[in-house]
Amino acid sequence: MSGSSFGNLFRITTWGESHGMGVGVVIDGCPAGLSLCEDDVQAYLNRRKPGQTRFSTPRKEDDAVVIQSGIFEGHTTGAPISMAVYNKNQRSADYSEIASYYRPGHADYTFDQKYGFRDYRGGGRSSARETVGRVAAGAVAARFLETLGIRLLTYVKSIGPVTADAARFDAAQISQNPFCMPDAAAAKKAEAYLSECMRAHNSSGGIVECIISGVPAGVGEPVFDKLDAQLAKAVFSIGAVKGFEIGDGFEAARAVGLEYNDAFYYDENNTLRKKTNHAGGILGGISDGSAIVLRAAFKPTPSIHAPQETVNKNGENITVQIKGRHDPVIVPRAAVVVESMAALTLADLLLAGMGARMEDVRKRYRPE
């Protein structure tokens, strides 16, 4: 199975299955000398940990990370960083009957068609639990970016029909409600909406928004490795993502040039800035120095207890009610996954950009 690696210079490979011994990641290319410990990574993993509210899967996992290599005396050594999280609360028997049919909205059918075999215990590599490795690696990338003054703020913009009101935006609220929404009133409406979905044995989708500040102008490549293209690839690689936007996104299609184009000006410090940010911080595939704004649309969780029509391997049309422990909405736990993939993309492109100018190469290898 190919496709488990991401990045070029800051490169990660995730491994493991939902109901195997564990999941994890190997990071290759992290510079030596970065201050890092397990607590830094654990803080990120705790944001996606299951079983924390009644609106997430009741599967209980500590998601305790073990850094197995690449760290010495609290700093990265430049060697590959291997991290593992061991599964402790698998209930594979809940999934035994799934072997005989294809779950609607899942990758069961496509895995069978590609490999002629699938791990039906929770979805194997297509399970949301694969994202543990991404988040562990994302914590390292975010730590790297933080040393450069780059910060990421990620939250749930909407759940179903409930959208956070920009006029009530409060970053402190993100960690104070179970939906990671920056609007307390919207969070209450989301709770009511999801409670209704759960009573109907149904699920909901939503939108995650990420704002990245402190990115200098000049990050990204102008052709195939555009910053926005790489971010799109990174975010679309997350299971259940069905839409992606930068800046105004699809709203740009309804705008005219005079209102969409971001005018430039010099501020009182003679620093070049933009009066607006419809482009979301990226022009021509390269960062322009303003905040990068991206959004990811997640589909509703496909595993629901309500009756659904499907087929079994005997060629029969059947109706199923999926058992097991599942999230009625995944976007609150997915926010940190989006943040992690954005951080990994930026870390990789920042390192790639170090050789763009001869003057930078000379400073490194022929300092005056």
Image (spheres, rainbow, N blue to C red):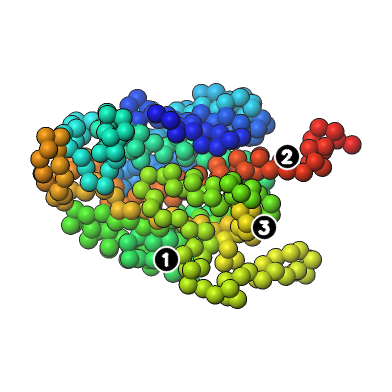
Q: Is residue 65 visible?
A: no
Choose between 306 and 254: the one closer to the eye: 254
The disc, 1 or 3, on the residue closer to the chain's N-terminal end is 1
Separation of residues labelled 2 and 3 (CA atoms): 19 Å
Q: Residue 259, how many percent across, how many down? A: 58, 75
* Element assignment for label 3: loop
Determine whether, in the image, residue 160 is placed left or right of residue 97: right
Label number found at residue 289:
3
Rendered view: 133 above or below 249: above
Q: Residue 103, how many percent across, how many down? A: 21, 42
* Element assignment for label 1: loop
Please give the residue where the numbered disc 1 appears in the rendered image: 164
* Mark 2 crowd level (few <14, some 14–19, many ≥20, 10 Å Cα): few
User: Which-is-in-front pick, marks 2 and 3?
Assistant: 2
Separation of residues labelled 1 and 3 (CA atoms): 26 Å
User: Which-is-in-front pick, marks 1 and 3?
Assistant: 3
Q: Are marks 2 and 3 in contact (CB under 8 Å)?
A: no
Please give the residue where the numbered disc 2 appears in the rendered image: 355
